[in-house]
Structure formats: C-alpha cells, structure tokens
Amino acid sequence: MSIRVMLVDDQVLLRTGFRMVLAAQPDMEVVAEAGDGLEALEVLRATKVDVVLMDVRMPRLDGVEATRRICAQEDHPKVIILTTFDLDEYAFSGLKAGASGFMLKDVPPAELLAAIRSVHSGDAVVAPSTTRRLLDRFAPMLPTTTAEPQNKELERLTEREREVMLLVAQGLSNGEIAARLVLSEATVKTHVGRILTKLSLRDRVQVVVLAYETGMVRAGGGPA
C-alpha cells in the first residue's frame, strides 16, 4: 500500500520538484497539494494523507500553526517541517507544534524519501543530537509553567527508564545507550518504547523536548 503524501508550499516550482521525486517511487504517491496552511487544512478534511511535507513561511497561515492544528486532531497525518536554514526558530516551533521532524529544503532526494518512510513507520526523522543542538539554542524559549505536572509524570518511570531517557535527551542512539549501560540494543529499544507509552509521547523528539522542559537536562545537553 502506497504512502499517501501531501505537499504544502507556496512555491509551485518546489512542489513540482518534490512531486517528481515522489512519483518515481513505487511505494509513494502525492495525493494532495496546498499553497498555504489554510488550504492544507481544508484539503485534509476531504483527503486521507499519511505524511505531510510542510513549508513554514507561507501566506495566510504559516506551517507551524498549520502543523499545530493538524496534530491536534485525532488520527492525524505525520508532519515533516521543511526549513531553509538549519536550526532556525521555525524548526524549533515546528517540533513543539507536533511535527515528527524537520529537514532542509535542499535535502538530497534519497534522504527525503528515507525520512518519509521513517515517519510513516512511526519513527522521528530528526537525529537526537540535532534536536539537542536545536534545543540548546532555543532553550530560553521553553515554557516553565508546565514543568511541575510534567515532573510528576516522570515519577511513573523506573530508575532505569529515567537513566535511558536522560541519555536519549543527551543525543545518544540506542546502540550508544546500550554500550553505556551494558545492555542489549533490543533492551534499550524496549525501555524507550515504555518511556513513550508511560509519558504519552509520540517519538524521541518529544522525549528530548520533555527532558528540557522538566529540567532533566540543561542547555548544553548535560544532566541538570
């Protein structure tokens, strides 16, 4: 079954380029396009989409707010934010709004296709280390008013799960965490899955964001 993709960008030429790349894939199809966030929301009401490639700087409604509205709905498509500059404020805002990751617009086609497949399968497409650098830069923008209830949520984790969460937030991969804690990679993956379930988080990106919001890690990526 093909991955149903929607392209949202106010630049027609860019959408055309992405459409040509995706159309050449046997497991993907572009089922919808939109020139801004409002149009995207309207189209999604009538079209089933699995993954949305979302630009951020658009007229009427930008990609960040469109992403927030999309991700607030039940059974919503996954969203990949497309940015022009690495680690800009739009990427940060997009992750906070619920996007499963962000990529640069000049990403090589193979990486874009891999990202779409990854997000569709339930993974995030932002490397934890990249997310950590992003949050280090924009840590002052993180809200503090929600820290107390989120800290209470962390009490649901076992000591080992908290240890794994801290290492995820510091940008380590499952393999690196396994080596650090002398565990199998499969065991680490299980721990990460339980963390996501207990804290009602979507993916590793949200784990990193929550770790910053609750003060588990501080700017610079180290433990608080």
Image (cartoon, rainbow, N blue to C red):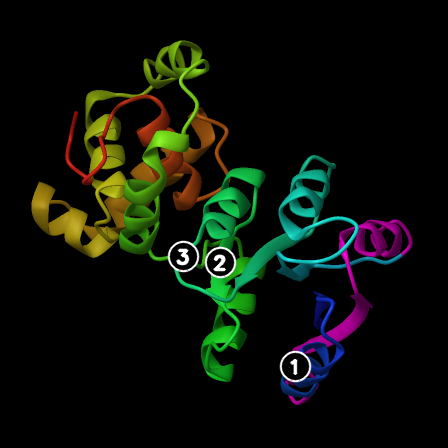
Neighbourhood count class around disc 1 (C-alpha, 10 Å): few under 14, some 14–19, many 20 upward? many
214 sits to left or right of 59: left
27 sits to left or right of 149: right
How far is disc 3 from disc 2 in space, using C-alphas? 6 Å
Residue 18 colored magenta? no
**Identity of the residue furthest to the right in this view:** 46
Residue type for callout 3: Val
Instruction: Give the foreground label among 2 and 1.
Output: 2
Is residue 153 in view? yes
Neighbourhood count class around disc 3 (C-alpha, 10 Å): few under 14, some 14–19, many 20 upward? some
**Precedes in sequence: disc 2 or disc 1:** 1
Residue 28 colored magenta? yes
The residue shown at (34%, 38%) is 208
> Are the residues at dot 1 and dot 3 in contact (C-beta closer than 8 Å)?
no
Q: Quadrant of the C terminus?
A: top left
Residue at mark 3: 126
- The x, y position of residue 4, in whole percent, is 73, 67
**Precedes in sequence: disc 3 or disc 2:** 2
Q: Quadrant of the N terminus?
A: bottom right
Labels in figure, total: 3
The residue shown at (16%, 53%) is 176
Q: For the residue labelled by badge 3, is the local secondary structure a helix, a strand or a loop?
A: loop
Mark sitting on residue 102? 2
Residue at mark 1: 22
**Precedes in sequence: disc 1 or disc 3:** 1
Foreground pick, 200 / 142: 142
Residue range in magenta is 23-46
124 sits to left or right of 99: left
